[in-house]
Amino acid sequence: MQKIKIGLIRVVSFENKKLIGLHGKLIEEYFPCLQLISRCIKNQPKGIFDEESEKMAIPKVIGLGLKIEKEEKVKAIIVSCAADPGVKELRKLLKIPVIGAGSSVAALSLSYGDKVGTFGITEQAPTIMREILGKHLVAEARPEAINTTLDLMTDKGKRNTLKSVKYLKAKGSEVIALACTGYSTIGIANDLEKEVGIPVLDAVIAAGLFAWHFTRGSI
Amino acid sequence: MQKIKIGLIRVVSFENKKLIGLHGKLIEEYFPCLQLISRCIKNQPKGIFDEESEKMAIPKVIGLGLKIEKEEKVKAIIVSCAADPGVKELRKLLKIPVIGAGSSVAALSLSYGDKVGTFGITEQAPTIMREILGKHLVAEARPEAINTTLDLMTDKGKRNTLKSVKYLKAKGSEVIALACTGYSTIGIANDLEKEVGIPVLDAVIAAGLFAWHFTRGSI
């Protein structure tokens, strides 16, 4: 089977090839007809964590997007960050679909329910997600006492995470959109979904779904 | 291969079984692992065309949704109308995903682009679509001198349709969401897309995509 090539941009500067390819592998598991070409931006080992780091990342994402498209002849590009850095800009420069993880998970949640809760790593969900969700956004949460996604793996981290997700449900959320792709790296969507009893949507899988849909039949 | 059963509600009272099953067949072509069980509401041969007819349809959609779920053990229900009649209500009554064609095509368009145009059969897109698109909705159109989707098949109808779609692109739309499932019946999305050069998204296919995604692995 000839696979459809999709570019994937990580906004954390990993050295480790396995880490660079992790989101791509996740998408390939769900969509075996896709082949993900993963690259990461340079000199941002901590990724995007505030406005300043997002501003720094945008031109790098744009440059990398143009490079992947040219060199690898991919049929679509995924920007694997819930803040969609560089997505609007790349769409203006490229003819292929440019899919952002943030807009994807927000869009996917609106197809399922009228009331959406977001679970991020910062106080608020990224602007693009808040914009798309609009009045359908009923609550936002982040786990308490967490600094990085690694902290989520501890027992205390897991308890705090579950508490936050239950709060989102109590606020009326019919579906929860994960507002950070760091959660994809540790794969908590399914675990949370089982615990809380409403769908918990992973931003990387959401981006994979749309990349798959918009490139079907493009070979 | 065991197929996943999905209920599909048509909001036009057709007598002809082929017509009743047409949207379901369309989804099965795109998603061969799904089996669509199509039913239509009673005593509305003209379907939903204004506020009054929408109000009349809602309790019928709810009743039919509950009946299909009970009798057919479907894994999700699609309401195949761009106004999403009864979708919010059914979501409160059922545990399975309830997918509306209007919210689906609006959501799908937001995964692709920041600026969305809608092409409906009425002056404005249905409320649910306008709500979801929010400020991302840059233009709305309908073909001129058209009363039913059948009029679209004439040469004059085709010319007028293309004119409207070009207007949406000129207004800055990066993607066009079809705001009436009557367009799915005649399958114009692909034709318009080729002519206008930006994606034209079919509301029934969009609903099929999300029904497929949310029921994957549910057998």
Image (cartoon, coloured by chain):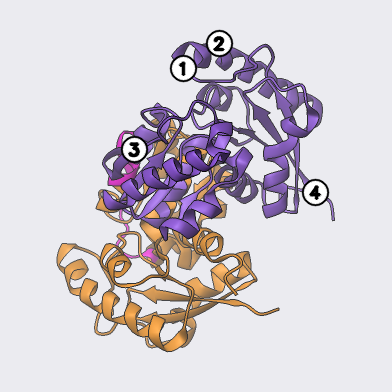
Chain colours: A orange, B purple
Q: Chain of mark 4?
A: B
Callout 1, which amino acid? Answer: Asp
**Same chain shared by disc 3 and disc 1:** yes
Residue pointed to by mark 2:
B56
Q: Is residue A125 left or right of residue B219?
A: left
| Marks 1/4: CA–CA distance | 36 Å
Q: Nearer the viewer, residue A217 or B189?
A: B189
The first of marks 3 and 4 along the sequence is 4
Which region of the structure is painted magenta? A131-149
The first of marks 3 and 1 along the sequence is 1
Q: Please say if the residues under marks 3 and 4 sit with CB atoms less than 8 Å apart.
A: no
Secondary structure under badge 1? Answer: loop
The first of marks 4 and 2 along the sequence is 4
The first of marks 3 and 2 along the sequence is 2
Q: Which mark is residue B50?
A: 1
Between label 4 and label 2, give the one nearer the viewer.
2
**Same chain shared by disc 4 and disc 2:** yes
Q: Say if the magenta span includes residue B86.
A: no
Secondary structure under badge 4? Answer: loop
Q: Chain of mark 2?
A: B
| Marks 4/2: CA–CA distance | 33 Å
Residue B179 drawn at (x, y percent) = 46, 36
Residue pointed to by mark 4:
B3
Q: Is residue B213 left or right of residue A175?
A: right
Check the image and name the residue furthest to the left: A52
Residue B106: quarter of image: top left
